[in-house]
Image: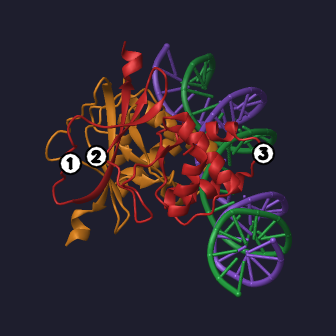
Chain colours: A orange, B red, C green, D purple
DNA sequence: TCTCAAACGCAACGATGTTGCATTTATTTA
DNA sequence: TAAATAAATGCAACATCGTTGCGTTTGAGA
């Protein structure tokens, strides 16, 4: 089964029509492999409507297909969700890592699960943004 | 020694002129106590130039006086740095916590220092954004 | 093929980021 | 205290992105 069919299947399971832009955007993100900057998505598209792209990304996030990563400089990255995410919500346990050398952003797993506790606070969810050197750039 | 003098001292140690806007912005942030939304800063100022405020916040961050917190919805918050931060860089060990009830964002310490390790990666810095219920809203 | 809710495309508006440049000002120095 | 100057301001100008409304188009099921 090729990627195009897989994408359409995925959209169907989330009750979304398989429109051209949606399929195209998902193909671009899947092809990029790591978390993709918003600009990169725009650059990869030929003709597109800005507002439609905006709504497309939002609904893909809402349905648990994509998740958004906001960097400190307000740059937005998008990445595929894991299978645990659904229309009901996101379930990410990974860390968002940005390499200072190659500037790539990726979703990585920690060696140990992260334990987080704050006095008097009830933590329901958290996100970790780490920076440093990725495996390739460390060599 | 009153707050005004303290603010001017702080600016001097970071080699920054004590201009009206800088002093005013720092007084607003200190008065707010917790992390302050960008909008709240604007609302608290009477007459101000948007670009000057933009540059003011940037240079205060650059000199280790403030730090910026980017929320997932692209809303920006600003908070005072600890004394460990300087012109040489930021040294935050705390967690940025957003209460889902009162929507306040604050810098809080964890019970245990956070240990983070990712296979093949070298981590030089990381930031944690947590959501849940703060002490006051839990009662 | 028909039907219709869903999605698109465009207008319109607002907030913020960013740079250049002439003018003003805080602080140092004479 | 006044002069000198590097720093900071204020404004123009431009760009990007977020967001909503609305008429038109279209994907997918009947």
* Front residue (pair A114, C8): A114
Write down the chain letter for disc 3.
B
Mark nearer the viewer, 3 or 1: 3
A1 over A123 or under it: above or below:
below
| Residue visible at 48% across and 32% down in the picture | A17
Disc 2 element: strand
Write down the chain letter for disc 2.
A
Mark nearer the viewer, 2 or 3: 3
Disc 3 element: loop
Residue B20: x and y, percent?
70, 53
A99 over D28 or under it: above or below:
below
Residue B74: x and y, percent?
53, 42
Do tag 1 and tag 2 residues touch (Cβ < 8 Å)?
yes
The answer to whether tags 2 and 3 share a subunit is no
Do tag 3 and tag 1 residues touch (Cβ < 8 Å)?
no
Residue highlighted by disc 1: B116
Relative horizontal placement of residue A8, taking residue B9 as reference (left or right): left
Image quadrant occupied by the C terminus of chain B: top left
A8 over A131 or under it: above or below:
above
| Residue visible at 40% across and 62% down in the picture | B89
Give the distance between the C-alpha atoms of the residues marked 2 and 3, in whole angstroms. Answer: 42 Å
C2 over A38 or under it: above or below:
above
| Residue visible at 36% across and 16% down in the picture | B138
Residue highlighted by disc 3: B47
Residue highlighted by disc 2: A95
């Amino acid at each position: 089964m090729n990627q195009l069919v897989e994408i359409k299947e995925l959209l169907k399971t989330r009750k979304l029509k398989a429109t051209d832009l949606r399929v195209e955007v998902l193909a671009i993100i899947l092809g990029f492999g790591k978390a993709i900057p918003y600009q990169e998505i725009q650059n990869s598209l030929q003709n597109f409507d800005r507002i439609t792209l905006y709504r497309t990304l939002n609904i893909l996030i809402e349905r648990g297909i994509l998740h958004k990563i906001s960097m400190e400089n307000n740059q937005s990255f998008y990445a595929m969700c894991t299978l645990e995410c659904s229309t009901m919500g996101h379930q990410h346990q990974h860390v968002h890592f940005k390499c200072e050398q190659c500037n790539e952003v990726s979703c990585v797993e920690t060696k140990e699960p992260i334990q987080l506790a704050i006095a008097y606070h009830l933590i329901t969810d958290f996100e970790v943004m780490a920076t440093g050197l990725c495996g390739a750039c460390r060599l």
